[in-house]
Image (cartoon, grey):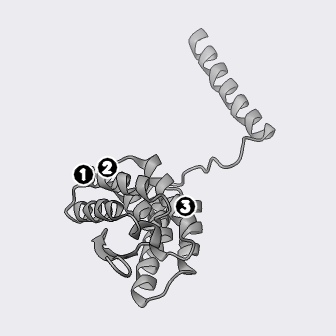
Amino acid sequence: MNGELALRGELGGHSLACQCPPALQLQPEAVEYFREGVEQLQSGNAGPALLALSRATELAPSCGEAHVFLGLAHALSCQIYPAIDHLERAAELMPESFAAHFTLAQLNFKLRIPQKGYAAAERALGCVQTLEQRKALTQLLKEERARERNGIARPWFNKPYSKPGLWLVGSGAAAVIGALLLHVRW
């Protein structure tokens, strides 16, 4: 097991190259769990991949690639909060990793959290090294913009209600209640 551990997997239609840091290579058991987890993901078995990749991140918590794949496994298992946590952890561990930022952007867009998606996509853009990566990111942004154009406008809950806004909501509710009372009396 000399040198770098390099694995390529076709996940979600995009190629993710994985080169684990020396921390993972020092622990052969972590390498085995990592390999097993990636193989399970490639086979479409998210459950077994979760177990193997969780074990790999326990043994080598500084392996950002293991966090990326564990985040993918959680997302495929519909465990959204752990998926976000592991992808954010991977982005922290590997600030220059296109795969970590791109996958985080992709998940945020799927969850309809565009602000975080665009922020992660911008960080991914700074990490682009190949034409393939640039094309994948361009396609992701194109799909998100089309979704925004064709979708229903949704409120962003990043600002608290203002007093005038609460007054309008309250006066609207009062008008409805007043109309109902007048209707019932007649």
Decide which of 174, 76 is in the foreground and name it: 76
Q: How far apart are marks 3 and 1 (CA)?
A: 31 Å
Q: Do the residues labelled 2 and 3 touch (CB within 8 Å)?
A: no
Residue in the image at 31% along x and 68% along y: 12
Q: Is residue 160 left or right of residue 3?
A: right
- What residue did someone put label 3 on? 114
From this viewpoint, is residue 149 visible?
no
**76 above or below 174?**
below
Kindly identify the amino acid type of the residue bearing the numbered disc 3: Pro
Which residue is rendered at x = 53% and y = 59% of the image? 89
Circles 3 and 1, Cβ within 8 Å, touching? The answer is no
Q: Residue 87 carries which label?
A: none
Q: How busy is the neighbourhood of tag 3: few (under 14 within 10 Å), some, or many (20 plus)?
A: some
Q: Is residue 7 left or right of residue 119?
A: left
How packed mark 2 is, by other alpha carbons closer than 10 Å (few <14, some 14-19, many 20 or more), is: some
Label disc, if present, on residue 77 of the rendered structure: 2
Q: Is residue 23 left or right of residue 95?
A: left
Q: Which residue is rendered at x = 38% and y = 63% of the image? A: 27
Q: Eyeballing the image, is 4 above or below 32?
A: below
